Image: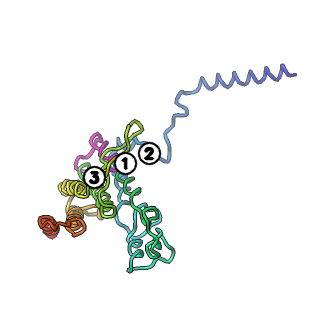
């Protein structure tokens, strides 16, 4: 009985091997039906635009539990402007005087650097994407603005931060990057905004209403230069920084 049973098992195994070898080699190499691969995204300009749309989540918002950056309601509740009944975003740390370097509320570091990495990924691929060149230029402008916003809010919270403009991979040897100075970060932000302003329209119509406009870019530049001229970041009271802020504000009005 044991010999017969063993022979049957061997026969079944051989049969399975023959069946498997006769199947198509790519049987298991199937495309996902509920997700897009990186190769798909960077070969289709419409998917690239969807990728860009998702990065709007980095911009200021009122409140959403799915967000990974601080909200306007959280900032209000951490001051005397409002009160958060449910301690969203741990804003009670401010009210109770419990904020420390290791005990933060509305920490933006991880969230913003995640969006910065996505922006850097976009810039590494966009030149090779085929399609409407005007749309590509507009998307480039939007992503420059988004990356500039992330860095502006970071330096407003933490001072100078590491300027990362590449995507790190497992093959990189060194992941340690020194912090850049506040002025170096601000120069980068202004450069990004100047380039974005050249490619974005003054207004949109139809389904594109609400996208980043030239006015939004110039407004952020105006605020950034105003912060740079403030006593906190301009202790020597360099008058030229105030004049730059004035010129930037006038550019928005004009």
- Disc 2 + disc 1, Cβ < 8 Å: yes
Marks 2/3: CA–CA distance:
36 Å
Task: Give the magenta range.
Answer: 117-134
Secondary-structure class at tag 3: loop
Question: Looking at the image, how many numbered discs can be counted on the residues?
Answer: 3
Secondary-structure class at tag 1: helix
The residue closer to the viewer here, 101 or 83, is 101
Place of residue 153 in the rendered image (x, y in percent of width and height, measured from the top left): 31, 62
Place of residue 21 in the rendered image (x, y in percent of width and height, measured from the top left): 60, 23
Residue at the spot x=26%, y=51% of the render?
140
Place of residue 29 in the rendered image (x, y in percent of width and height, measured from the top left): 51, 34
Q: Quadrant of residue 73?
A: bottom left
Few, some or many residues within 10 Å of mark 3 (<14, 14–19, 20+)? some
Which numbered circle lies on residue 36?
A: 2
Residue at mark 3: 180
- Principal SS element in the magenta part? helix
Image quarter hosting the N terminus = top right
The residue closer to the viewer here, 178 or 80, is 178
Marks 3/1: CA–CA distance:
34 Å
Few, some or many residues within 10 Å of mark 2 (<14, 14–19, 20+)? few
Marks 2/1: CA–CA distance:
9 Å
The residue closer to the viewer here, 240 or 212, is 240
Residue at the spot x=24%, y=56% of the render?
189
Single out the mark in the foreground, 2 or 3: 3
Residue at the spot x=23%, y=67% of the render?
227
- Disc 3 + disc 1, Cβ < 8 Å: no
Which numbered circle lies on residue 223?
A: none
Image quarter hosting the C terminus = bottom left
């Amino acid at each position: 009985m044991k010999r017969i049973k063993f022979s049957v098992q061997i026969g079944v195994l051989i049969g399975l091997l023959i069946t498997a070898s006769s199947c198509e080699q790519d049987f298991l190499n199937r495309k996902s039906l509920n997700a897009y691969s990186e190769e798909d995204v960077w070969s289709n300009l419409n998917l690239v635009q969807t990728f860009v749309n998702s990065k709007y989540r980095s911009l200021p918002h009122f409140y959403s539990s799915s967000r990974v950056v601080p909200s306007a309601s959280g900032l209000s509740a951490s001051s005397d402007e409002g009160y958060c009944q449910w301690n969203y975003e741990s804003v009670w740390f401010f009210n109770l005087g419990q904020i420390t370097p290791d005990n933060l509320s509305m920490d933006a570091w991880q969230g913003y650097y995640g969006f910065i990495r996505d922006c850097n990924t976009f810039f590494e691929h966009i030149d090779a994407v085929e399609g409407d060149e005007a749309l590509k230029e507009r998307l480039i402008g939007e992503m420059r603005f988004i990356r500039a916003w992330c860095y502006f809010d970071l330096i407003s919270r933490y001072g100078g931060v590491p300027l990362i403009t590449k995507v790190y991979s497992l093959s990189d040897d060194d992941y340690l990057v020194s912090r850049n100075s506040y002025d170096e970060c601000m120069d980068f932000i202004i450069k990004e905004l100047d380039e974005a302003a050249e490619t974005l329209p003054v207004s949109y119509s139809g389904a594109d209403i609400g996208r980043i406009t030239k006015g939004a870019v110039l407004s952020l530049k105006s605020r950034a230069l105003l912060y740079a001229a403030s006593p906190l970041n301009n202790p020597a009271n360099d008058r030229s920084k105030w004049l730059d802020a004035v010129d930037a504000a006038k550019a928005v009005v004009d």
